[in-house]
Image (tube, grey):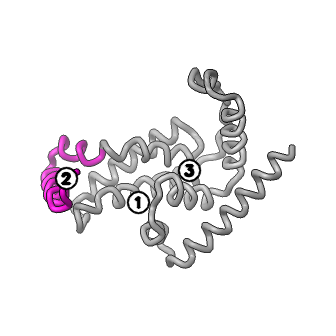
Amino acid sequence: MEPISDARAGRSALVAAAVRGDRDAFARLVEPELRLALGTAIVIVRSHADAADVVQDAMLSAWQSLGSLRDPIAFPAWFRTHVVRAALRAARRRSPVISIDVVSEASRSADVDAVVEQRMLGRVFDTATLDDRVLLTLRYLWGTPVSEVAAVLGVPEGTVKSRTHAAMARLRAAYDAEARR
């Protein structure tokens, strides 16, 4: 693992190059974040196609505003904010999407109970509000610290904690109801 100072210097150099218009430098900054960015966008907008558009929008937004990034080491969190905001905009302007449940090759060979459990959790998560999906995605999919979630959402840390608790309670209740069906 490289020392923090080397990571800071490397990221600072990439950000500086990207600000000057170096697309390769920007690609090197964004590439490690793309898998989670797409996963988060899918969870929020509930559509693979729309999620890909969201990530493209977030990348464009980040590229255009890269000069406003104060601390290059914070690029991942800063980019995450662009993804979440783009996903929220997309989710609010689009009507709900009906997804078709396709059985993947991996799930056919997987444990049937695990696949059933995953699908049930997916159905339950689909019923969650947009705000709950965003909050739970940031906290549990990305493992984002409370302070960073608060900054992304523009709310106090205490609000993040109470909303997370309430969202988890709603998710558990919906899961229990689905399990009883």
Secondary structure type for disc 1: helix
Q: Is residue 125 above or below residue 108?
A: below
Q: Residues within 10 Å of mark 1 (few under 14, many from 20)?
A: many
Magenta segment: 1-30
Three-letter residue code for mark 2? Glu
Q: Earlier in the sequence, mark 3 or mark 2?
A: 2
Q: CA distance from mark 1 to mark 3?
A: 13 Å
* Distance from the alpha carbon under mark 3 to that under mark 2: 33 Å
User: Which residue is at 57% across, 51% downward?
Assistant: 91
Number of the label disc, if any, that sits on residue 2: 2
Quickly name the residue at label 3: 44
Mark 3 is surrounded, within 10 Å at the Cα level, by few (under 14), some (14 to 19) or many (20 or more) other residues, namely many
Identify residue for label 1: 81
Q: Position of residue 42 (x, y in %)?
A: 53, 43
Q: Is residue 13 magenta?
A: yes
**Number of numbered labels in the structure image:** 3
Q: Earlier in the sequence, mark 1 or mark 3?
A: 3
